[in-house]
Image (cartoon, rainbow, N blue to C red):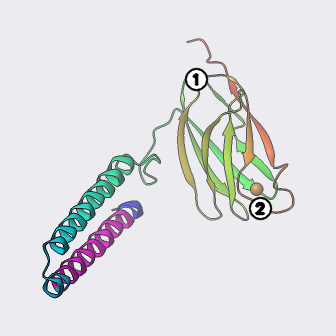
Amino acid sequence: MVIQDVIWTIALCGIAIVSLVFLYILAGTGKAADEAAKSAAARTARKIQGGLFIILLLGFVFGTWATLHQFPIPRQDASLQADQVVDVTARMWSWKFQPSSVEAGKTVEFRVTSADVNHGFALYSPDGRIVVQTQAMPEYTNRVLYRFEQPGTYVVQCLEYCGIGHAPMKATFVVAAPKGE
Ligand SMILES: [Cu+2]
């Protein structure tokens, strides 16, 4: 079980416990109010409240599942089996790539880490769109898989404020045209 699965399970158990406590309180307060008021209007209001709560709850559960069940970051413990691997090291205030260019049309695994503080690794395509983004963290390697379709000179920019040299912490990264087979 990887850390993401553990956190996911804990979060789901937490949501379940909070929901049960909510339902318990809702049921208890509803009964007391009903007995005190003895009115049909109070009962109807309680039913509407309960119904709305269940609809909201189901909506949140479904929304969470639908948006998170395909976690967008690859498993960090499995081999990504990329055609090319680039080691990225961030430090105040520069980037180091090993190697410094890749070939378009083949998968690339970026292994991103930091030699000092947290940095944000963002790779912009020649037309200015972010195509790869992850955190550069000290003593940890984040892995991202990407396949470049468009050759050209890409720009790397730090997206996590890291001191006086943060804004100019840029570099270029070359994606070469595919070599003929
Ligand atoms: Cu920075």
- In this view, which residue lies farthest toward the top? 180
Q: Are marks 2 and 1 in contact (CB under 8 Å)?
A: no
Q: Main secondary structure of the magenta part?
A: helix
Left or right side of 46 for 149: right
Look at discs 2 and 1 and give the one toward the viewer. 2
In the image, residue 65 above or below residue 82: below
Rendering coords of residue 114 (x, y %): 69, 58
How many residues crowd around disc 2 within 10 Å: few (fewer than 14), some, or many (20 or more)?
A: some
Q: Looking at this view, is 66 or 94 the one in front?
A: 66
Query: Disc 1, ligand 1: is the CB inside 8 Å?
Result: no
**Number of the label disc, if any, that sits on residue 89:** none
Q: What residue do we see at 22% from left, 69% from top?
A: 45
Q: Which residue is mark 2?
A: 162
Q: Where residue 44 sits: x, y (%)?
A: 17, 67
Relative depth, front residue between 67 and 133: 67
Secondary structure type for disc 1: loop
The quadrant of the rendering that contains the N terminus is bottom left
Q: Report if the beta carbon of the residue with label 2 is closer than 8 angstroms to ligand 1.
A: yes
Q: Quadrant of ligand 1?
A: bottom right
Asked if residue 59 lies in the magenta stretch, the reply is no
Q: What residue range appears in magenta?
A: 6-31
| Mark 1 nearby-residue class (10 Å; few <14, some 14–19, many ≥20) | some
Tell me which amino acid carries mark 1. Glu
Q: Amino acid at mark 2?
A: Cys
Q: Residue at x 33, y 57 (%)?
A: 60
Q: Residue at x 67, y 22 (%)?
A: 151
